[in-house]
Image: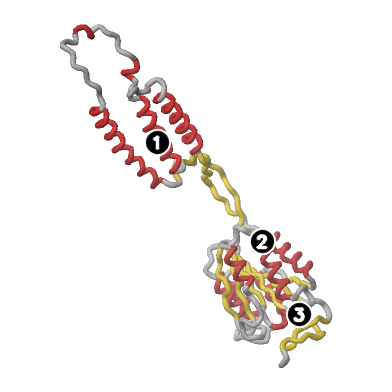
């Protein structure tokens, strides 16, 4: 048996002065009667109450001891079992360029990609997941973490304009690789999502893919955008305006990245297709981790609490009935 709050057991020391006080009090509370001789009392029967007169105090001490144990929260940990869980290291590399504001996905590509990715994160509680964003350059929005509440919060804060505009696919992929290369996980994955072609950065996408392969990192690439034309943003002196523009995604580069690293290329032409893609990746990336011993703790304070109440009730009943003192 273990205790969740073992420091509370120091309260047991308070019982020592209580016992000392009771002993000293007994010496001062005895009644005295002067008689010339004890001969007439030698054969008098001794009442059982005399032998058990300290019983109420003992019951009170024991009940206080049990209350302190309850406060310390005793737990049993003698149940052991094998547990199998799943977990891999994943970096999501998200394009946040201006073209991601196109409205062929609802409400736009960027928000649709964020929403589906967040659902994907929620469905993988055992994974280390991180987030890299890229446009004209790239940076890490969140390193690998199992604190998915923090990750989701940082994901929600991602928006257009946080980086210089452009599409540096190679830089985004290289940044994601730097976050995974030292991982000890047997399975390391990058999910790279973009809606354009590489037009910025100093690293070619295929070069970054070769680096990923050397570190055993698998890259799933997603080209997001409808077939044909889409309402796309145009920067004007009056702000962002929209007009129909041809959707241009360098699918060959994205396919090359996936093929070089043992991943898969997907095309997301609408919200449902994007959701299906993440579901497919979720099913493909399952790594079992065997945990040989798993200690299951159970709260056992109830029996101590019940015993304390029972003893306290008995002590009060005896004190005011059998051992009642007459002033």
The span from disc 3 to disc 1 (Cα, nearest Å) is 70 Å
Quarter of the image with the C terminus is top left
The span from disc 1 to disc 2 (Cα, nearest Å) is 55 Å
**Element at label 3:** loop
The span from disc 2 to disc 3 (Cα, nearest Å) is 30 Å
- Label 2 belongs to which residue? 285
Quarter of the image with the N terminus is top left
Residue 39 is left or right of residue 118, and the answer is left
Which quadrant holds residue 41?
A: top left
| Residue 239 position (above or below residue 305) | below
Residue 14 is left or right of residue 4, and the answer is left
- Label 3 belongs to which residue? 102
Residue plotted at (58% across, 76% down): 175
Q: Could you say where residue 247 lies in the image, as x and y percent from the top left?
A: 79, 82
Q: Could you say where residue 99 lies in the image, as x and y percent from the top left?
A: 72, 82
Which tag, 3 or 1, sits closer to the chain's start? 1
- Among all residues in the image, which is located at the extreme bottom? 237
Nearer to the camera, 275 or 313: 313
Marks counted in the figure total: 3
């Amino acid at each position: 048996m273990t205790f969740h709050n073992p420091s509370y057991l120091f309260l047991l020391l308070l019982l020592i002065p209580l016992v000392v006080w009771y002993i000293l009090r007994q010496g001062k509370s005895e009644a005295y009667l002067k008689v010339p001789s004890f001969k007439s009392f030698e054969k008098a029967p001794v009442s059982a109450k005399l032998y058990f007169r300290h019983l109420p105090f003992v019951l009170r001490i024991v009940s206080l001891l049990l209350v302190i144990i309850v406060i310390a929260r005793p737990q049993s940990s003698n149940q052991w079992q094998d547990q199998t869980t799943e977990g891999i290291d994943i970096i999501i590399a998200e394009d946040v360029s201006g073209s991601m504001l196109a409205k062929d996905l609802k409400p736009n590509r960027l928000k649709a990609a964020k929403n589906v990715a967040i659902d994907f994160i929620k469905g993988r509680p055992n994974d280390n997941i991180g987030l890299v964003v890229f446009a004209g350059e790239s940076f890490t929005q969140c390193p690998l973490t199992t604190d998915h509440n923090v990750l989701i919060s940082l994901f929600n804060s991602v928006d257009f304009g946080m980086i210089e505009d452009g599409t540096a696919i190679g830089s985004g992929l290289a940044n994601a690789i730097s976050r995974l290369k030292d991982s000890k996980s047997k399975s390391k994955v990058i999910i790279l999502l973009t809606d354009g072609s590489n037009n910025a950065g100093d690293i070619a996408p295929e070069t970054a893919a070769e680096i990923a392969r050397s570190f055993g990192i698998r890259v799933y690439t997603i080209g997001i955008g409808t077939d044909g034309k889409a309402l796309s943003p145009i920067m004007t002196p009056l702000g962002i305006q929209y007009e129909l523009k041809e959707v241009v995604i360098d699918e060959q580069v994205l396919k090359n990245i996936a093929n070089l690293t043992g991943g898969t290329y997907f095309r997301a032409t609408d919200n449902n297709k994007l959701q299906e893609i993440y579901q497919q990746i979720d099913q493909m990336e399952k790594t079992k981790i065997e945990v040989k011993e798993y200690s299951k703790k159970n709260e056992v304070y109830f029996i101590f609490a019940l015993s304390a109440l029972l003893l306290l009730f008995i002590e009060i009943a005896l004190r005011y009935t059998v051992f009642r003192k007459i002033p």
